[in-house]
């Protein structure tokens, strides 16, 4: 590791001694973003923290899935349980809304939307808005919004891309071939054309990876092959200059082969089967421009997600395990924008139908449904060029639980052309999900505990009690009531400073105060000793910190960018308990002593420091090379001193550095070649990062058969 | 965090003991058990408290349903044949700790859990209420994760004594003692979170604790 830091230092010294030439750092402010204000705005004119990942960066990094893209971005951390989720401003994956072309993806498992479901192949750019200043998007947009904008060009074009990768994490630097090597193949086909006025574009991607898992409580790797298919068809038809129609249908399929053994006190059960997940998104938008000032967009969106797991047992061939989850989500929305010289008014309203079936609810056939009627408005005022003030609010009327009101206020001020500051405050919310309302699940394979959603928990437990099956009702049982949405108030303040056109800085300070956090609590104990859990709004927490990014064009061909996030979190009740001297820890003898405030680390699975460094070398002859360094400091994983607050005496996963490199060349014949290596130093942590593959080498090519100018 | 909690539910198991103190003594390796006396402070290592013999069909650990009886007055492990006497002050079985009174024995025992550091308890507060066992419904020293002296982590399947909990004991003969449970695993070392379930099961139910006994009948230590 020491060698490595020396290497980085050397790179820096070499680079900074170069003379400086031309650059393009200030150009980024001219990029257009839509997610921040729901209207098209130049990045430099937006009052809330927003950042963009563009197609070129995604291609150059050799990213295949959305997870690969986001993990290299400042302030985002990819979590590991129930698929790859994204942690933003220290908030769990549950609180980030993920959209494709402005429409939300559904189908979360335990609150996590698996980022591996989304291929990076046809992403034109990704817009990331942090903090609840993104509150006009409704539920889930509490930590922020990630909007994936797919490629929507309809010029005559046909191309294909292929990539093959392999790795053998256990063999060090020797060639990773042989039967125990891991393989990874990715194939993409895409084409588009405009027939008279009708624009047609299709995209297909097939991806195979020998993903790995580990045998239960061991370090034995088990291949877990995953197939993923994505197809998307997009149509665009302009009825006139004023009226346009867009249609998109996207289908994603995922097949994961499963084969594992669980040892229970010497008895081994071999399970085999598969997990399959399917999602379908259909999206149509009619937009109409009434005049140069007024335009409206009518959006109709339908999406479904169907996930299932089927397992059979070798020792008991007649029995099987089936777990199914189905979600249907329909949304109808209109948004109208009115533009005056110095201001813009946005008004919108919509209706959502959200439905779910699950084998983990009382009856798979009994469909659960929530409907939401919502309206939002936003007024953007630009009294002078230098100043923008935006106020907005949204009201969501839920059928199943309390209404949510989310206001926001944001402002931006250009002190000079080189220095722009902005500040925003907003409230976001997350509605309780179906699982928290309807779960009715008893796990006989693991101790026989039960979890009941709040809608029926009291009724079920009272029934069990009258049958004499309850040994003890916990204090939390009496706190069970209708779940309320979780709320967060976020404050962001930051700025952009561009001293020369070779150098740029971005910074943002944030604080999120979260209340009504929903927690799973033990509410009763059955007479046979098994626990019963349900959900309660209990916790109050905060996350706060700062984010810093810098970009520097060292020489014409070499660009360096760096990012850093500092994060502090706390459960407010725990903090109060520590401050009032009620929390203890143990000294090296095992004897109790008072826990100090400075030892408290806040919420688990959060790193205080996260940083990234990216070097991009690009020549006029269209050759490029990148190296990306991603660092994350240690994070708390288990409470080992018994006091149930996470502190420096607990068990931590060690911090780590990931290094990815890539290089490629665009040939004149329409062929693009690329090769790279992910996780160069083969970093692995079986216990805490089970899905982190070892070193992977890949080669790829992209062919454009037909390109019109 | 929520995913963690969800996961914890997935693997949660309850330590559950069915018991009667009249059963036959268990055979143990006496080398594992030791008592160290250092002035007023006594440390007991590896007291086996009904170590597990298997799992129930629901995956919960079970033992033979027996107790390890201990005398704070004499620093000795008391034979099961003396279970119906006032010779013992505490009886350990799994996570259950019983005091010698009423449903548990003929003595005048009692206990309550005091929050604070062991050394800071120099005299038992005047207004203290000593509880007694009401087996099998409730105990002077409450059972359950976060209720009395331990926390159980469903993610790691590990049981840890809560730091800052002192068991204030009235002995079978009406004297007083303060006890701090230090560890629940063999050798006084909690297995690492990534240890196998097998190890976590096999090495549990070995108490390491320290105590100070006040033999003169006063409530100061």
Image (cartoon, coloured by chain):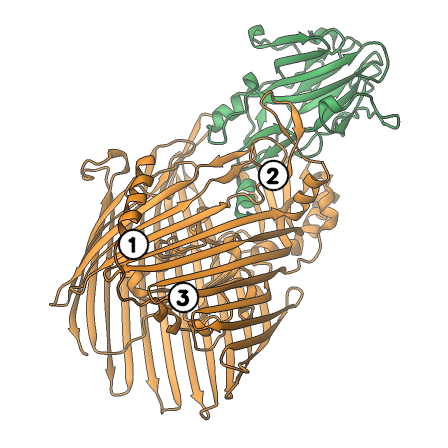
Chain colours: A orange, B green
- Which quadrant would residue A644 be assigned to in this image? top right
User: Which-is-in-front pick, marks 3 and 2?
Assistant: 3
Tell me if mark 1 has few (under 14), some (14-19) or many (20+) residues whose alpha carbon lies within 10 angstroms of its own. many
Vertical side of A641 occupied by A410: above or below: below
* Tag shown at residue A615: 1
* Residue A377 or residue A614, whichever sits in front: A614
Q: Position of residue A282 (x, y in %)?
A: 40, 72
Image mark 1: chain: A
Numbered badge on residue A598? 2
Graded by Cα atoms within 10 Å as few (under 14), some (14 to 19) or many (20 or more), the crowding at tag 2 reads few
Quarter of image, res A70: bottom left
From the viewer's side, name the closer residue of A450 and A110.
Answer: A110
Q: Earlier in the sequence, mark 1 or mark 2?
A: 2
Chain for disc number 3: A
Q: Is residue B94 visible?
A: yes
- Residue depicted at 51% across the width and 54% down the height: A546
Label 2 sits on a secondary structure element that is helix
Q: Residues within 10 Å of mark 3 (few under 14, many from 20)?
A: some
Q: Report x, y in % for residue A178.
A: 18, 37
**Dot placed on the residue nearer the N-terminal end, 3 or 2:** 3
| Mark pair 1, 3: CA separation | 19 Å
Q: Nearer the viewer, residue A532 or A463?
A: A532
Q: Which residue is mark 3?
A: A498
User: SS at mark 1?
Assistant: strand
Residue B45 quadrant: top right
Closer to us: A340 or A551: A551
Chain that bears disc 2: A
Q: Which residue: 24% across, 37% down? A: A180
Q: Residue at x 44, y 51 (%)?
A: A77
Estimate the x, y position of residue A456 in percent, counting from the top left.
Answer: 66, 54
């Amino acid at each position: 590791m020491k060698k490595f830091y020396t290497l980085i230092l050397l790179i820096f010294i070499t680079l900074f001694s170069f003379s400086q030439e031309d650059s393009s750092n200030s150009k980024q402010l001219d990029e257009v973003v839509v997610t921040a204000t729901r209207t098209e705005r130049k990045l430099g004119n937006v009052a809330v923290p927003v950042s963009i990942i563009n197609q070129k960066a995604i291609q150059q990094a050799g990213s295949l899935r959305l997870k690969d893209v986001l993990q290299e971005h400042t302030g985002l951390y990819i979590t590991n349980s129930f698929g790859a989720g994204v942690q933003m401003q220290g908030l769990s994956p549950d609180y980030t809304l993920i959209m494709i072309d402005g429409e939300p993806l559904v189908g979360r498992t335990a609150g996590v939307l698996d980022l591996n479901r989304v291929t990076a192949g046809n992403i034109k750019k990704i817009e990331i808005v942090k903090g609840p200043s993104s509150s006009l998007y409704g539920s889930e947009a509490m930590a922020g919004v990630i909007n994936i904008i797919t490629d929507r060009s309809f010029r005559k074009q046909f191309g294909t891309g292929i990539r093959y990768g392999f790795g053998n994490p256990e063999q060090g630097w020797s060639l990773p071939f042989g039967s125990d090597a891991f393989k990874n193949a990715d194939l993409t086909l895409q084409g588009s054309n405009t027939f008279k006025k009708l624009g047609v574009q299709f995209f297909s991607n097939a991806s195979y990876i020998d993903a790995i898992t580990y045998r239960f409580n061991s370090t034995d790797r088990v291949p877990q092959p995953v197939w993923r298919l994505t197809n998307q068809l997009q149509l665009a038809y302009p009825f006139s200059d004023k009226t346009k129609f867009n249609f998109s249908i996207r289908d994603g399929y995922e097949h994961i082969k499963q084969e594992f053994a669980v040892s229970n006190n010497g008895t081994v059960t071999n399970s085999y089967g598969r997990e399959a997940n399917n999602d379908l998104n259909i999206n149509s938008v009619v937009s109409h421009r009434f005049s140069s000032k007024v335009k409206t967009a009518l959006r109709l969106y339908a999406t479904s997600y169907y996930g299932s797991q089927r397992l059979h047992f070798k020792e008991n061939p007649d029995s099987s395990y089936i777990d199914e989850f189905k979600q249907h989500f329909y949304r109808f929305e209109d948004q109208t924008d009115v533009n005056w010289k110095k201001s813009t008014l946005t008004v919108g309203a919509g209706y959502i139908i959200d439905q779910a079936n699950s084998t983990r609810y009382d009856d798979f056939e009994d469909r659960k449904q929530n409907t939401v009627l919502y309206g939002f408005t936003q007024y953007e005022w630009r009294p002078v060029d230098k100043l923008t003030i935006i106020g907005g609010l949204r009201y969501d009327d839920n059928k199943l639980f309390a209404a949510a009101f989310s206001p926001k206020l944001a402002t931006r001020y250009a002190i000079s052309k080189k220095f722009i500051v902005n500040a925003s405050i907003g409230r976001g919310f997350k509605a309780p999900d179906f699982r928290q309302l309807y779960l009715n699940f008893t796990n006989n394979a693991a101790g026989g505990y039960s979890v009941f959603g709040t809608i029926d928990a009291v009724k079920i437990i009272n029934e069990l009690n009258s049958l004499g099956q309850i040994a003890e009702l916990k204090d939390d049982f009496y706190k069970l009531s209708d779940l309320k949405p979780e709320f967060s108030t976020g404050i962001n303040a930051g700025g952009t400073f561009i001293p020369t056109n070779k150098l740029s800085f971005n910074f943002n300070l944030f604080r999120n105060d979260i209340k009504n956090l929903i927690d799973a609590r033990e509410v009763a104990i059955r007479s046979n000793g098994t626990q019963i859990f349900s959900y309660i709004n209990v916790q109050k927490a905060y996350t706060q910190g700062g984010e810093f990014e810098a970009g520097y064009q060292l020489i014409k061909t070499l660009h360096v960018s760096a990012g850093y996030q500092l994060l502090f979190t706390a459960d407010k009740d725990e903090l109060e308990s520590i401050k009032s001297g009620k929390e203890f820890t143990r000294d090296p003898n095992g004897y109790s002593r008072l826990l100090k405030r400075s030892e408290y680390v806040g919420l688990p699975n959060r790193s205080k420091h996260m940083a990234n460094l990216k070097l991009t070398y690009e020549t006029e002859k269209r050759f490029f090379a990148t190296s990306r360094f991603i660092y994350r400091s240690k994070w708390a994983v288990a409470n080992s001193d018994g006091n149930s607050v996470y502190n420096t005496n607990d068990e931590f996963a060690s911090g780590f550095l990931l290094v990815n490199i890539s290089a490629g060349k665009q040939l004149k014949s329409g062929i693009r070649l690329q090769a790279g290596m992910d996780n160069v130093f083969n970093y692995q942590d079986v216990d805490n990062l089970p899905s982190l593959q070892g070193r992977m080498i890949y080669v790829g090519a992209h062919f454009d058969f037909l390109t019109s100018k | 965090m929520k995913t963690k909690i969800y996961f914890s539910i997935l693997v949660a198991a309850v330590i559950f003991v069915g018991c009667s103190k009249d059963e036959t003594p268990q055979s143990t390796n006496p080398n594992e058990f030791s008592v160290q006396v250092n002035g007023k402070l006594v440390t007991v290592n590896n007291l086996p408290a009904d170590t597990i013999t298997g799992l129930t069909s629901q995956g919960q650990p079970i033992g033979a349903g027996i107790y390890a009886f201990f005398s704070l007055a004499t620093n000795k492990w008391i034979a099961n044949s003396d279970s119906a006497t006032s010779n013992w002050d505490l009886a350990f079985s799994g996570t259950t700790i019983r005091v010698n009174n009423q449903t548990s024995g003929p003595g005048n025992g009692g206990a309550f859990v005091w929050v604070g550091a062991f050394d800071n308890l120099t005299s038992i507060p005047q207004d203290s209420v000593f509880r007694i066992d009401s087996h099998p419904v409730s105990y002077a020293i409450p059972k359950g994760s976060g209720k009395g002296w331990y926390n159980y982590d469903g993610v790691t399947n590990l049981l840890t004594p809560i730091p800052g909990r002192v068991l204030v004991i009235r002995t079978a003969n009406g004297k007083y003692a303060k006890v701090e449970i230090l560890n629940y695993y063999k050798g006084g070392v909690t297995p690492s979170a990534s240890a196998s379930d097998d190890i976590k099961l096999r090495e549990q139910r070995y108490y390491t604790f320290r105590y100070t006994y006040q033999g003169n009948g006063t409530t100061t230590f």
